[in-house]
Image: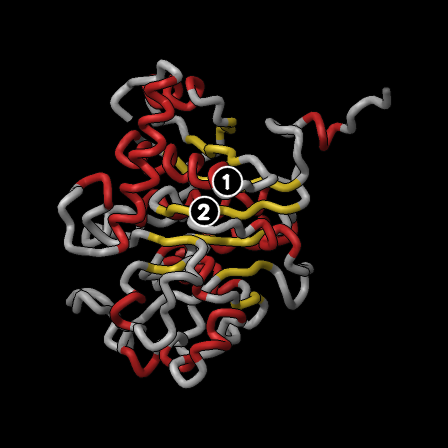
Amino acid sequence: MAEKSDRESARVVDSPKVWTTLITNTKYLSGLLTLDYSLKKVGSKYPLIALYTDGFPPEGHAALDARGIAKKKIEYLLPKAHKDYSNEVRFYDCWSKLQPFSLVEYDRVVQLDSDMVILQNMDELMDIPLNDTDRVFAGSHACVCNPLKKAHYPKDWVPHNCSFTSQHGDPDKAQMEGAPCNTGLSMVNGGLQVVNPSMKSYNAIMATLGEPSKTSSYEFADQALLSDVFKDRWVGIPYIYNALKTLRWCHAPIWRDDKVKCVHYILSPKPWDNRDSDDFTHTWWWAVNDERLAKEKEAGVVDGF
């Protein structure tokens, strides 16, 4: 048997293509466990790796280990100069979602947020053509409609400037094609990133994190950085792969329940925080989560997560 290369030996799973998700605390752990279960439920060929930081506690590690979820320690990223996100404290963790660009032991990494659930197999994301010039990564657009009317959001975050609004006239096409990356405000949503890890790209990210003149203007952390550093060099994919729950009502012309492959539970509350939410999409998460908990109980795994 041939010896493994250094690149292969660095892998924590025996697969050149992987899903990853960031976990820094146990508040999102139920989400991660349900995300992992949903990937397996839809028959994905590829494993999920939990990317954890120093602050992730022992009980979290025990929960991952009990379920056989692979994990890898990563460095917690922050810009050189402090950026105040007191209005959106979740953004402090978001910089670390850029770490998949550094995982050069893998040919393809698809980064997922832990507040997602997979409803249909989407392994085809592992085969989207990318390069390090004009197709550096793939993702779906951020919705810039500001549907909750948050006062601290930029004034240009209005429906007219939203890339999804540009697709209202052809809903069938919106299921199959994303809006070009230079439409609307040209901002990607960082919840799903399709990446060919590359030190060239990662070094560009790290250099930008060291430039206060840049990061001071990034109101949306990682996704603002990606949209700036790789401006016009990323691939827009259909909303179905990163179906922000708010799109169901603020972009109803293109939303199709039966086409959605991945729901992203942006904003608060998260499904696990409030079972009685009046948001219909939360019922999808709870159906998968309840099934997960029942299967885990049968296997003797009962730890409250």
Q: Is residue 206 visible to the viewer in this orientation of the structure? A: no
Looking at the picture, how far across and down is residue 146, in whole percent?
Answer: 24, 69
For the C terminus, the quadrant is top left
Which residue is most to the right?
A: 1
Q: Are marks 1 and 2 in contact (CB under 8 Å)?
A: yes
Report whether 3 appears left or right of 177: right
Task: Specify which label sits upstream in the sequence, 1 or 2.
Answer: 1
Q: Is residue 77 above or below residue 64?
A: below
For the N terminus, the quadrant is top right
In this orientation, which residue lies closer to the viewer: 247 or 204?
A: 247
SS for callout 2: strand
Mark 2 burial class by Cα count in 10 Å: few <14, some 14-19, many 20+: many
Q: Amino acid at mark 2?
A: Leu
Q: Which mark is residue 246?
A: none
Looking at the picture, how far across and down is residue 78, in whole percent?
Answer: 39, 44
At 37% across and 25% down in the image, what residue appears? 295
Looking at the picture, how far across and down is residue 266, in whole percent?
Answer: 29, 54
Q: Is residue 62 visible to the viewer in this orientation of the structure? A: yes
SS for callout 1: strand
> Number of callouts in the render?
2
Q: Which mark is residue 112?
A: 2
Q: Amino acid at mark 1?
A: Thr
At 29% across and 78% down in the image, what residue appears? 159
> Hey, which quadrant is residue 32 in on the image?
top left
Mark 1 burial class by Cα count in 10 Å: few <14, some 14-19, many 20+: many
At 49% across and 22% down in the image, what residue appears? 68
Disc 1 target residue: 20
> Hey, which quadrant is residue 211 in on the image?
bottom left
Looking at the picture, how far across and down is residue 290, in whole percent?
Answer: 29, 34
Q: Is residue 35 above or below residue 263?
A: above
Q: Is residue 132 above or below residue 93?
A: below
